[in-house]
Image (cartoon, coloured by chain):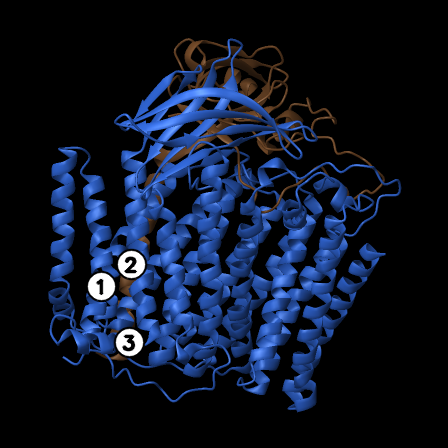
Chain colours: A brown, B blue
Amino acid sequence: MTRRQRRLTLIGGSLAVLAVAAALVLNAMRDSIVFFSTPAAVAEKHIAAGKRFRLGGLVERGSLVHGDNLAVTFKVGDGTATLPVAFKGILPDLFREGQGVVAEGALDASGVFRADTVLAKHDETYMPKVVADALKKQGHWKDDYGAKPDYNAKSAGASRAAQSARPVQGALQ
Amino acid sequence: MIAEAGHYALVLALALALIQSTVPMLGARWHDQALMNVARSTALAQLLFVAASFAALVTLHVTSDFSVVNVFENSHSLKPMIYKITGVWGNHEGSMLLWVLILALFGGLVAAFGNNLPLSLRAHVLAVQAWIASAFYLFILITSNPFLRIANPPLEGRDLNPVLQDIGLAVHPPMLYLGYVGFSISFSFAVAALLEGRIDAAWARWVRPWTLLAWIFLTLGIAMGSYWAYYELGWGGWWFWDPVENASLMPWLAGTALLHSLVVMEKRNALKVWTILLSILTFSLSLLGTFLVRSGVLTSVHAFATDPTRGVFILLILCIFIGGSLSLYAWRASALKQGGLFAPISREGALVLNNLFLTTACATVFIGTLYPLALEVVTGDKISVGAPFFNLTFAPLFLPLMIAVPFGPLLAWKRGDLLGAAQRLVAAGIAALIAIAVLWAWTRGGSAFAPLAIGLAVFVIAGALTDLAERTGLFRVPLATALRRARGLPRSNWGTVFAHAGVGVALIGIVCETTWNSEYIGSMKPDDVAHIAGYEMKLDGVTQRQGPNFREMVARFTVSLDGKRLGDMTPSKRNFTTRQSTTTEAALLTRGASQLYISLGDTAADGAIAVRIYHKPMVLLIWFGPVLMAFGGLLSLSDRRLRVGAPKPAHVPRGLQAAE
């Protein structure tokens, strides 16, 4: 085999693998990508029941109700709209009223968001970036959300954790 | 005083790095030995000063000096000593200091043990190493100084994030950083080779041990992090396809490819240009990982509130180093001479295939990790790419790679005999078929996927053993001869066997855990019994306990199997008063390679407690596999041929391969 043939074989093989990979990626992109939404955007866009998405916002104060057998309901709001959420399972340690939360699931026919995963963050001043952005965009951002304690040093930020810090999630399939 | 001394040491380290990044380059250009030798002494001195700076920060944390912002924010006087020390890198500033300490450590090691390197190559390598170091010293000093003081020192600190108060923090970040940063050496070697315009098989022999060392630590670091997440988070997951995890997986995939292409380059002097590119890419992915994590740019469940100026600074470092090295590559790579020829079916061909699949798999992870970011920048849409995406892309690419793994070591260099290799793998294939048949019968018409995947894993393991049997002539020559041959077999061959078998072992663990995992989620009152996978777990009661810096609610379960008592499990929930936060401490009971797992949820008003119980069959194999891989890497590293600093040996004849 000459150098040229060898090189063509290599290039051909590589292109074949890359084509397969591209097909896989495009296929996966179509089916497995989940969009993020806030309660206000849900009200606006009329997302179809059964379509999976991630809902982000603040857990409304006084809305958390524990039902039987680990069922919980709470409301997620973003200042304009609120959306009732139902979840069955164990909430993450940092799930609290008045704090940021991201839930993944779909709306049911009655307009309740059935979450199968609830994520909360392991930092008491934390608000999910998507939530903060959405709130800012709608002009509901208050500076005390995630406010940084001010000692005297301007560099002092809110508490941070190591690169390798692990997440806290609550999930139930 | 200590804080100021630490800060000053870091400034001095920067000054030394700046000297190290210029003087040796000039020396190499002017062929001045004295100037080139500056690299060695500055690299060692730099290590000394960074180590002093790091020691200063450790001292501040250990003595709980709350007049330093970093200590105040991340420590507490009641915190156990081990977490006072590990808390040093449990925060942004400290972890960046650890990053540069490890960078200086690798530079120092090259300086100390690189006596057999050509002088100009060593000067170039250390100079490139110092460029990276200078950039990161500046980053720390300008945006993330860990030694800042508070004017009115508070009496008590804000404590370390409770999730991080775990032994995992002592091991996982240092390991991971040793891996990440270790790839800087292969990067520096690659850039040095491009600057010199010269590269040969000896280059690969020098780079390989460093790459191997970094790879071993990265493998262990990722496995350790995965196990930490598994027991600390309380819901039994061990891999989330989270951006931060992907950030460590990408350099691992590229690094694994690099290890294999270095073999080709060392043995056959081929694939030079590709190996250089891979060295650059591997470290670029490590830098990208640092950027993704440190900038907080991704909405990751890991990303904590971070400062945007830092992100911009790291992005700048990223652009300069990745852009610069790739431009240099585009400009100089064509000057490198082409290497040896080989047929597509050959050991080289198999290693190229390995590289192809590993880098493609790495590319899909890259797309899945960065696509949401790109889309948000371009259209403003926010999406999340989760596990389903990676299961649909990464897994199909890994399957053909796994099938090919046993063939590689059985093919000859230059021109291989695929049919011959297949014939030698018949036994492994039969073992795989038996495994599939037995599992199929045992699960009786369950999912077909699990038995097939385990069959593949058995094929990989049996294939690795076949390679060993072939090389020692086991079953063909008398046992004593085979044993003698096994003793004489180069350790790098043993390394291959263990590392490849480790891949199979991990796959078995992954498949068993995901397919036959059983869970019970419900609320329990004292004396309630939960049944899972044949085990009975009785909740005996709940007690309160006071820890050093937390209060703890401990539940006691008695576990029995068929009426026979196996032991107690005591999961707990810890409440850290300083941060008003709670952590879940799961209880684990190990049965062989399987584990029972209990974690607690909220307590209801009537005293019932929410519990989550899992039975995870063969789950320990998921981490035992990587440990085997790392052990294989270690064996390979201890091969005389590769030992760091060993005199350049004459080419070792592969005379101990089984003569056909």
Question: Along the polypeptide, which appears first: circle 2 or circle 3?
Answer: 3
Given residues B290 and B503, the one toward you in this image is B503
Q: Which label lies toward us, 1 or 3?
A: 3
Which quadrant of the figure has residue B334? bottom left
Q: Chain of mark 2?
A: B
The amino acid type found where label 1 is placed reads: Leu
Q: Secondary structure at mark 2?
A: helix
Which residue is identified by label 2? B501
Q: Chain of mark 1?
A: B
Q: Secondary structure at mark 1?
A: helix
Question: Along the polypeptide, which appears first: circle 1 or circle 2?
Answer: 1
Question: On screen, A150 above or below B47?
Answer: above
Q: Where does residue A153 sit, x and y in percent of width and height?
A: 83, 43
Q: Which mark is residue B525?
A: none
Kindly report the distance in space between the C-alpha atoms of the residues bearing marks 1 and 3: 15 Å
Q: Are marks 1 and 2 in contact (CB under 8 Å)?
A: yes
Q: Where does residue B647 sit, x and y in percent of width and height?
A: 47, 86
Question: On screen, B39 above or below B214?
Answer: below
Task: Name which residue lies at 44% across and 56% down.
Answer: B219
Whether residue A24 is visible here, answered yes or no, is no
Q: Is there one chain holding both mark 1 and mark 3? A: yes
Given residues B502 and B269, the one toward you in this image is B502
Kindly report the distance in space between the C-alpha atoms of the residues bearing marks 1 and 2: 8 Å
Q: Secondary structure at mark 3?
A: helix
Which residue is identified by label 1? B465
Q: Residues within 10 Å of mark 1 (few under 14, many from 20)?
A: many
- The quadrant of the image that shows the N terminus of chain B is bottom right
Which residue is identified by label 3? B487
Task: Name which residue lies at 24% across and 60% down.
Answer: B404
Q: Residues within 10 Å of mark 3 (few under 14, many from 20)?
A: few
